[in-house]
Amino acid sequence: MTAHTATKYHPHVKLIFIGSFLFLVFASAAAMGFNTKLKYGQGRNASTLLYALDRYTENSELLQGKIQAEKYLKTRTIADDTIEAHIPSVGKFISADLDHMELALYENHLLLKKYPIIAKGKPGSFWETPSGDYQILAKVGTHFSSVGEVYMPWSMQFNGNFFIHGWPYYPDGRDVALGYSGGCIRMKTDDAKEIYEFSKTSTPIFVYEKSDEMAETRALFSLKNIPPPEISAQAYIVADVNTGEVFLDKNIDTPMPIASLTKLMTAIVANEVIMFDRKITITPEVVETLGESGNLKAGEVMTANDVLYPLLMESSNDAARAFSAYYGESSFISHMNKKAKAIGMKNTTYADSSGILSGNTSTVYDLYILSKYLKNNKSFILNITRLPTKKITSSFQVHNFGNFNVFSAEKNFLGGKTGYTRAANGTMISLFEIPIGNEKRNIAFIVLSSQNQEKDVRALLTWFEEAAS
């Protein structure tokens, strides 16, 4: 071999060279914002980064044997919440595990006693028991429910119209049937009395229900290494709302205006603090709200349940205002912000019930949490958002509401919401049921600050279906 023959490097030298290159790429990526975070388990924008690395290394002799494995993108997972994470080190605490139907009392982080839960709200119904972080708001020895027209002994209110209580009974003294439930957490009466005596107003309570009983047994999967689309949205996420697997994201923790995505929280709070059969009068102040969607008229009377349809299908600002005005503007908005915190939306602020104000801000991470909550705790709200049409008769007019959600006619659309304001640009939450192998997965596609939210979501959906096939 002459002095001009190409140098043949020792394998260890190759390793050092490639390792140095990878270090430089990751260091550069970190400087550009590809930072890591424990809650995901892998860096943001990992799909784009791994694609670039794969293209560079695919001809490398050293990594040739790993090429097939590297053709699939790894995912990272947003972990489910746990009861243990909420137990304070000091003070009293109550947990209500709706999976195992068990309520427990703690003090100074020590478990004192457990009790069986007799009944909870029916999943998927208007009366589904809300999970989340709450506190005892009020205690009443015997509370009379005007909805069920029953007495509820040892009642402890923890959220809106939801209580922990003993076995209800009718005014004539008869106990209600075993299957009777208005969504509250029912205990044996003697057990409810002990919990009542243990608790104080403001005692924290965490209501837990696993988002998907099968999540732990589902096989995690990886995507084919297809480059993600270039879209206009400044922040987005593609993630499984049951398993927490995140497949693609950008600027996941950056707060941005959310426009009419606000109305999803408006619907949740209206359901939890206003009885569905309450009569709501549309006032002149309500119809003066910006926007004409819904075609509501001053003086007409609708049930709280009926107002949900123009709110969610036609994104009516008047419908949103009707809810907040009925309950009390400041109190309703306060409930929206408290509910956001209760379900884990830590970087979200609501300024009004419609989303008109730029002060309605959130992150795509928080909106993923909201989507997960809707799918697993308030599925009836998502069901409304995918109806093609709905006929509602008010006190003096017949409404035929259409649907502003662009995907509502598609069979695999599970529901969502679209929005736009000048400050927010285009925003969208869309959930789809997508077959992957022998399973069907519930995937959320969320975009913020988009120049064309429908185009962006459709591009992400097409990319995901190709990469997951």
Image (spheres, rainbow, N blue to C red):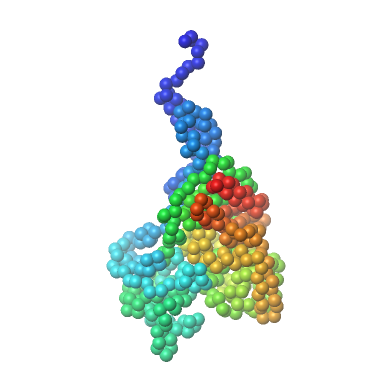
Please say if 275 is above or below 47: below
Q: Residue at x 46, y 18 (%)?
A: 8
Q: Can residue 84 be seen at all in this image of the molecule? A: yes
Front-most of 11 and 45? 11
Q: Quadrant of residue 168?
A: bottom left
Q: Can residue 325 be seen at all in this image of the molecule? A: no
- Residue 307's spot in the image, x, y percent? 62, 72
Q: Residue at x 42, y 82 (%)?
A: 176
- Residue 199's spot in the image, x, y percent? 35, 72
- Residue 337's spot in the image, x, y percent? 52, 64
Q: Quadrant of residue 87?
A: bottom left
Q: Quadrant of residue 446?
A: bottom right
Would residue 103 be found to the left or right of residue 312 on screen? left
Please say if 218 is above or below 100: above
Q: Residue at x 56, y 62 (%)?
A: 350
Total number of numbered labels? 0
Q: Residue at x 60, y 77 (%)?
A: 303
Please say if 17 is above or below 340: above
